[in-house]
Image: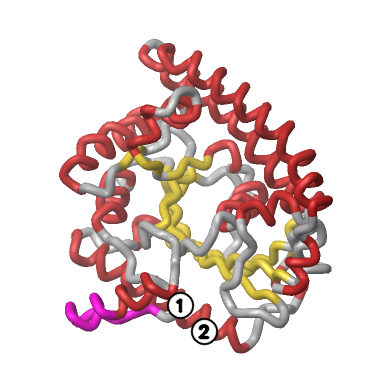
Amino acid sequence: MAAVAKGTTTLTHLRGIALTLPWLLALLVADVALSAVLPLSLLGPRLVYDASSRIAAVIWAWIQLIFVSFNGADIGHSGDELPSGESAIVVANHVAWSDFYMIQALAIRAGMLSRCRYFAKVQLRLVPFLGWGLWAMGMPMVSRNWLRDRAELGHVFSGIVRDGYPMWLISFSEATRFTRTKYAESMAWCKKNDRPQPRHLLYPRTKGFIATVQHLRKAPHVKAVYDFTVAYRRRGGDFQEAPSMWQTLSVPGLSSRCGYEFHVHARRFPIDTLPEMDEGLAQWLETRWVEKGEWLESVRHSWPADSAVRGHSK
């Protein structure tokens, strides 16, 4: 961490404050605006959804600008091309805060940044402005208790199906960030239950994925499932070593000076090619995670450095 340690000086912290304070103020204004329009969702749900999407796009594009343009994060990408404006279910592995930048980089390319919706903790509903803003945007609020979440997800999904909201509905299917301790727990669970343990990943949770696909395959505008694999490397450091949240907002030269490399690999699967039955969908997700692990292992030995293949988010 020598390169990063040199970068996290008092001057760097002050720089981070200068960069993020205007964004935080804009976020507060956006949350107040979103909270104000929340009651109108009973009268004009599509109008509120579109208005909240425009507000969110400004906030998300701004923080992406800090990460990429001001702090020099070079995001590589590979895999399938994603059609512009296509609504989809998105599943991804979860390593760090910076995963959001990786997903947003692809959303910007596909013209869907404003339509990104993430699964959020239901407790956030009680947080004034921030939680209300997420609620107004149509973020699914879940508790990770399947019996309690089923009704909420049914409500969210019915709006997407009935009203045709354009959307990337994004979930981190492992339900938590990867750590070595959690990886050991995942290995023990897989061994006990005779399931394959994906490399560099936690075994995915399947119930939420199954419910999402079974509901949204009824929506004619939801065309595909996207599988995103996020990968990190720091030159001279560990594979899957990502910067902290504050470093993404404050440290200049993340790729050039600090040596961080960021990559996201995308795969697109037409939703009508997925299995019909719940058991088949669970197996499908498991297979994707095993394949993701194999891809990550190949990346660990040979980083996808060919710029003609990677492309860059600049």
Q: Which residue sits at x=42%, y=81%?
A: 199
Q: Quadrant of residue 252?
A: bottom right
Q: Secondary structure at mark 2?
A: helix
Q: Position of residue 82 (x, y in %)?
A: 58, 56
Total labels: the figure holds 2
Q: Say if mark 1 contacts mark 2, CB within 8 Å.
A: yes
Q: Which residue is mark 2?
A: 297
Which residues fall within the magenta stretch? 188-198
Look at mark 1 in the image and give the residue it sits on: 200
Indicate whether 64 appears above or below 176: above
Q: Return the x and y of residue 180 as percentages of the image width and height.
A: 43, 75
x 37%, y 56%: residue: 271
Between 163 and 193, the residue placed more toward the observer is 193
Callout 2 amino acid: Glu
* Left or right: 54 as drawn, with respect to 277: right
The local secondary structure at tag 1 comes to loop
- In 3D space, how far apart are the residues under numbered discs 1 and 2 (Cα atoms)? 8 Å
